[in-house]
Amino acid sequence: MGFLAFLLLGLIAGAIARLIIPGRQKGGWFLTLILGVVGAMLGGWIAGFFVEDAYENFWSIPAWIAAIVGALIVTIIFNLLFNKRGSRV
């Protein structure tokens, strides 16, 4: 898969991850898209342990699953780190 196709896959995976995760999230769509690209990279790295050539082509089901799961993981971690609500003690 080419570099631009990989970026497009990450952008779409980030948007899907944002739609899947419930609740209000910090950051706009630009941050979501960046998290999606980072998540696609993470998903590809994890998928490399289980599936040979997960990112063989753009329409590969393993590529989409890996990118979306990676984007979900990165988005959840980001939300846990930066969406802390002030607690009154």
Image (cartoon, rainbow, N blue to C red):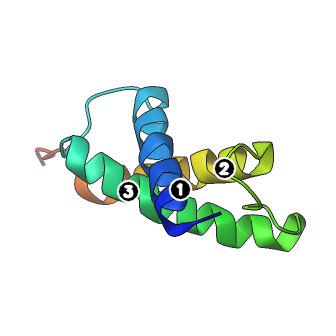
Q: Which mark is residue 58?
A: 2
Three-letter residue code for mark 1: Ala
Marks 2 and 3 in Cβ contact (< 8 Å): no
Mark closer to the observer (1, 3): 1
Q: Quadrant of residue 21?
A: top left
Real-space CA distance between mark 2 and mark 3, rounded to the nearest whole angstrom: 19 Å
Image vertical order of residue 49 relative to residue 79, above or below: below
Relative placement, left or right, of 66 versus 74 is right
Image vertical order of residue 22 relative to residue 33, above or below: above
Image vertical order of residue 57 relative to residue 41, above or below: above
Q: Which residue is mark 3?
A: 35
Q: Which residue is mark 1?
A: 5
Residue at the (72%, 61%) spot, across then down: 55
Question: Quick one: label 2 or label 3, which is nearer the N terminus?
Answer: 3
Residue at the (49%, 29%) spot, across then down: 20
Three-letter residue code for mark 3: Leu
Question: Quick one: label 1 or label 3, which is nearer the N terminus?
Answer: 1
- The one nearer the camera, 14 or 86, is 14
Is residue 35 in view from this perspective? yes
The picture places residue 66, in percent across and down from the top left corner, at 68, 53
Residue at the (88%, 63%) spot, across then down: 51
